[in-house]
Image: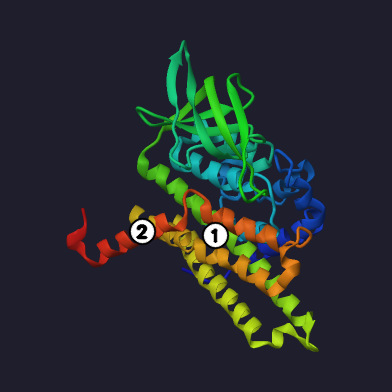
């Protein structure tokens, strides 16, 4: 595993960072979309697609870059640092990983090609384990059921869902009859989540879906979202450190006070510990590892999410009263981190599973 980015990865990072700073700044872009029902602006989305970021994980034969989760993590970290809203994680990570891990190439080809060129926004509806029922309707299949917490369902053209008994992956086009998406509130307004209802909605059966492969897709999403959260934590830490350098109290910069220095060091330590876990998990997502070892890497990133969220809280302590105001961006970063903390369950659940798995590894007699 190489912990250093290659020249190409550094170029991808720098290009994405410049684009977001120029075309999607916090003040002019992100804040304007906080209350927007879809959370995406066409020009910026088109720009991300033109940079090739939507097709990073799409195989080259479908018009994508055929890159790895490491490159996706590079982009995700920059999106997190910019608090970028919109369906990038759903479209550029969750959907292509689901299609490439679960589907036959031919059936997935049209969707993958649309993702690569930016014309198709897609999302995945089975991250929290939800399934729907499928039944034959002549030569077609229709789906019935409801799914909670589906990201970006209002803007997506394609929704990938799991049908039960037997498990199979279906593609649902969101303009089909019987499809509805109702907004669900959350602490992070840069993330749009919906309760999706399927009432006799036509769907295309793509392939069967085994639990191991489905679990791998969920791990991929957790890992990519961890990279996003790492970017948010790094950015709010940098803002707080810069503030401590010029904010003066009692005739001195507050960064010269030991109490503030300790807070900044705590943030740095937490961010760098998270960085190590995220880099390892991104590598593990594509490495030739057994499913258990790969899943363990994802568990570690999510189990650490509570610690990473404290970076936003600590930064607000450095900012003092101004950090609590709506006009300051610190609370937006904290909410992004808290959103990561609660994604697919809080960290306690993952700490428990992580502890059980590590105990099983160290004590083989306890394995079931």
Q: Which mark is residue 70?
A: 1
Q: Which residue is painted at 79% across and 44% down in the image?
A: 43
Residue of label 2: 352
Q: Is residue 84 visible?
A: yes
Front residue of 7/97: it is: 97
Horizontal relation, residue 230 to residue 15: left or right: left
Q: Does residue 289 appear in this view?
A: no
Q: Looking at the picture, how far across and down is residue 366, in whole percent?
A: 20, 60
Q: Percent x, y for residue 359?
A: 27, 64
Viewer-closest of 19 and 286: 19
- Image-quadrant location for residue 367: bottom left
Foreground pick, 171 / 134: 134
Q: Residue furthest left?
A: 365
> Earlier along the polypeptide chain: callout 1 or callout 2?
1
Frontmost of labels 1 and 2 is 2
What SS does tag 2 mark? helix
Could you say where residue 285 lies in the image, as x and y percent from the top left?
46, 56
Residue 212, compared with residue 161, is above or below; it is below
Q: Quadrant of residue 308?
A: bottom right
Q: Which x, y percent locates residue 183?
A: 63, 36
Task: Give the total of numbered labels.
Answer: 2
Q: Nearer the viewer, residue 115 or 136?
A: 136
Please report the residue visible at 47 percent of the width from the left and 61 percent of the height from the top.
301
């Amino acid at each position: 595993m190489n912990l250093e980015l290659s020249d190409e990865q550094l170029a991808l990072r720098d290009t994405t960072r410049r684009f977001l700073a120029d075309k999607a700044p916090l003040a002019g872009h992100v804040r304007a979309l906080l209350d927007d029902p879809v959370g995406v602006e066409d020009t910026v989305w088109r720009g991300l697609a033109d940079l090739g970021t939507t097709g990073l994980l799409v195989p080259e034969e479908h018009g994508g870059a055929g890159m790895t989760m490491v490159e996706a993590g590079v982009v995700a970290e920059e999106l997190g640092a910019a608090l970028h809203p919109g369906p990038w994680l759903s479209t550029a990570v969750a959907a292509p990983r689901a299609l490439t891990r679960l589907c036959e190439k031919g059936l997935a080809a049209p969707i993958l090609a649309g993702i690569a060129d930016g014309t198709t926004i897609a999302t995945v509806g089975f991250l929290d384990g939800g399934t729907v029922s499928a039944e034959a309707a002549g030569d077609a299949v229709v789906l019935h059921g409801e799914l909670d917490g589906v990201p970006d369902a209002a803007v997506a053209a394609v929704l990938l869902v799991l049908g039960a008994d037997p498990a199979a992956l279906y593609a649902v086009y969101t303009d089909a009859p019987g499809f509805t998406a109702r907004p669900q509130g959350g602490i992070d307004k840069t993330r749009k989540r919906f309760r999706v209802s399927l009432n006799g909605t036509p769907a295309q059966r793509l392939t069967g879906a085994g639990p191991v492969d489905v679990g791998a897709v969920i791990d991929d999403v957790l890992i990519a979202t961890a990279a996003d959260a790492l970017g948010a934590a790094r950015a709010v830490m940098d803002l707080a450190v810069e503030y401590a350098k010029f904010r003066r109290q009692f005739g001195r910069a507050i960064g010269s006070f030991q109490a503030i220095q300790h807070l900044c060091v705590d943030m740095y330590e937490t961010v760098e510990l998270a960085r190590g876990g995220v880099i390892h998990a991104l590598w593990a997502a594509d490495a030739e590892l057994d499913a258990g070892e790969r899943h363990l890497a994802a568990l570690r990133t999510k189990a650490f999410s509570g610690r990473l969220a404290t970076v936003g809280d600590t930064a607000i302590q450095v900012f003092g009263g101004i950090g609590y105001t709506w006009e300051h961006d610190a609370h937006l970063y904290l909410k992004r981190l808290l959103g990561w903390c609660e994604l697919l369950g809080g960290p306690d659940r993952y700490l428990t599973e992580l502890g059980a798995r590590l105990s099983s590894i160290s004590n083989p007699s306890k394995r079931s």
